[in-house]
Image: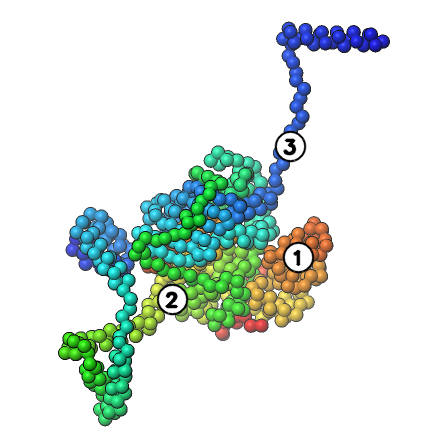
Amino acid sequence: MMRLAAKAMTAALVLLIAGVAIGAPFVPPAPPAPAAAVTPTPRAILKMALDAPRLIDYEGTKIITALRNGRMETVTVAESHKRPNLLRLEYLSPEDVAGRVIVDDGTTARHYEPALNMLFEDRSIQDGGAGAAAGLTLLTRNYDIVLLGTDEVIGRQAYVLSLTPHGTGVQRQLWVDRLTGTVLRSEDRDASRGLVLTTYFSRISFSLNLPEAYFRYRPPAGTRVVSLQTVAGGTLNPAQLQRQVGFPVLVPPALPEGYTFRGGAVSRFGSLVSAYLRYSDGGNIISFFEAPAGSIGWPAVGVPVRVQSQPGRFIDLGYFRVLIWEQRGLRITAVGTAPSETLMLVAGQLIAGREQALVTDVSRRTEADPATVRRLRSEGLTFPEIARTFAISHALGTSIDTTVRFVHGSLSVTDLATQLRMRPDALRAAVRRAVDTASMTPVLPAPAPSGPPAGLSTP
Amino acid sequence: MNHHRAGRLLSAYVDSELTAAETRAVQEHLLDCAACRDAYENLRAARDLLGGLPPAEPPAEFWAAVRGPVMRGAAAAGALGGWAGRLRAAWASVARFPWPGIAGRRPGLVLAGALVALALAALPLVKGTVDRLHATEIGVDLYVHDHALQMGTAPLVDRAYVGLVAGDAELVLAGNAPRPIGDDVR
């Protein structure tokens, strides 16, 4: 038996050698299948993009195409970044910005304008990734984030991410570098006007040891230095703001889906003092500037409009839209990327001025103390947000203050779930149920009552 | 723009007091005219030199010498009555001040100096009015500037674009560029 087996093996070996000799195809054994490349989730890619400024240095040439001075213009910028928050921008073209330099150390932005030999000192134009966590929470909550695939940008592989707001505002598409998380290309689209802003690097270098001195700007001799620190105290709530400016501060009763209060500030320029309220959905911002009507005139530009029968003016700046109107002694200016109809609706609700009636209505619906509703209004919450806060607080048994942090996006689902010892999925479902029961349609504007501005009742 | 008109506007150009159209016209003329370029450089150098001078303070005895006689003169001028009397008393006191050198012999110069001092004292009031007028003109640009800066702190917003918008607005706020408006219907 053993002899037979040995003969068979020998025969097989001979046949195999013979086969090779006569050129029969040799099929090598298949290599082990490679582990499938793990594609990160859209959220993970977004987080990588948000974290990148704190981790990566780069230097490159960026091309921006945007509406400027009434027409689409292409601007070339040499952009350098040193982690975590040093930024240098040198504008190369077109001619009217060529030579402009902005150097930002995360606290102060210094803008040098060579044609005027002037240096403007202003607030920083970045946060160095400090708000990345809150930004990620708001973006994942208020945007559909979809990975469209991968693409090549200047020879580098990039994830293509689409961010579409649940509410209103520009839709953004990002090309995120696979290795560093740096945004290599971006496109902002407006629902009614299409592409309103594109940016892309035509060249970029990473892992440079850029000297810190490169991010300190020393203007030429004889430069006139102008301090333009127009905004102070960006974390005030409306009640604190009202005390600082000395006139009533109006808080919008309702805003587009996802927009939440992100801070108030005093804006000063010469004798013009304005209260500044900022609302964001994580990706877009709506700003409200309120000033006594007598302190500022109507601009000579824009299109005259009527907001709830009140005279107003609408200015389309391309990427931004501006709506200005007056109500009861205040001149209010809203600036944002939201459509004009949305800005008009928000303005109409402010003009309606039904603050006390809405406080009573929401208190009754949510079985909440009117004083607490007023306190939350003085902290900048809209009425739908307040209704949501009470509903979630009742459903989860969380305190009002904790729930407000959750509604504002300062507390993520994961953080709250950990606090409550719940699974994030279960928490999401519970919040969804609570919010559905508390859904509060923004109240339609009613004719403006006469009399002094209601403002906030200071707690 | 001809050479003569450009020459007349140079001083205002150096002080950034021209309209955008005039500024452009002067700039174009400067490119072609060497004489105006020289004049412009001289004016700019003079402005920088004056701008760098520290503010002059009058000597301490000036105020004592003015205040005392004015107070006495005001009492004595009661008989003259009203502003006329007070002015005469003040003028007499200024004339009595022991001005060094030529000033003592030229009271007209002293009067001019006093008027300049008065103008300087009134400057904050005038400046407040100018600020208010300026605020009227720049309201939209100021708010777009503040909004753009806040946008810069939002995640994933392009900082180079924010810098462009904020930089443009800063030029308008400083009175040095045309208003960046998309649908101008003035």
Q: Amino acid at mark 3?
A: Ala
Determine the secondary structure under disc 1.
helix
In the depicted structure, whether residue A96 falls above or below residue B13: above
For marks 1 and 2, the one nearer the N-term is 2
Please state the horizontal and vertical placement of residue A377, each as a whole percent of the image.
58, 66
Crowding at mark 1 (Cα within 10 Å: few <14, some 14-19, many 20+): many
* Pointers 1 and 3 in contact (C-beta within 8 Å): no
**Can you tell which quarter of the image residue B8 is in?**
bottom left
Determine the secondary structure under disc 3.
loop
* Pointers 3 and 2 in contact (C-beta within 8 Å): no
* Residue at image location 37% in from the left, 64% down from the top: B135
C-alpha gap between disc 3 and disc 2: 62 Å
For marks 1 and 3, the one nearer the N-term is 3
**Can you tell which quarter of the image residue A361 is in?**
bottom right
* Residue at image location 18% in from the left, 49% down from the top: B34
- In the picture, measured across the screen, residue B28 lies left or right of residue A391, that is left
Please state the horizontal and vertical placement of residue A358, each as a whole percent of the image.
59, 67
Q: Chain of mark 3?
A: A
Question: Considering depth in this image, is B103 or A108 the residue closer to the camera?
Answer: B103
Crowding at mark 2 (Cα within 10 Å: few <14, some 14-19, many 20+): some
Q: Amino acid at mark 1?
A: Val
Residue, disc 3: A36
* Residue at image location 60% in from the left, 45% down from the top: A43
Q: Which of the labelled discs sits on residue A270, or is there none? A: 2
Please state the horizontal and vertical placement of residue A53, each as a whole percent of the image.
51, 47
Q: Comparing marks 1 and 3, which lies closer to the viewer?
A: 3
Determine the secondary structure under disc 2.
loop
Q: Which of the labelled discs sits on residue A435, or is there none? A: 1
In the depicted structure, whether residue A177 falls above or below residue B21: above
- In the picture, measured across the screen, residue A437 lies left or right of residue A148, that is right
Quadrant containing the C terminus of chain B is bottom left
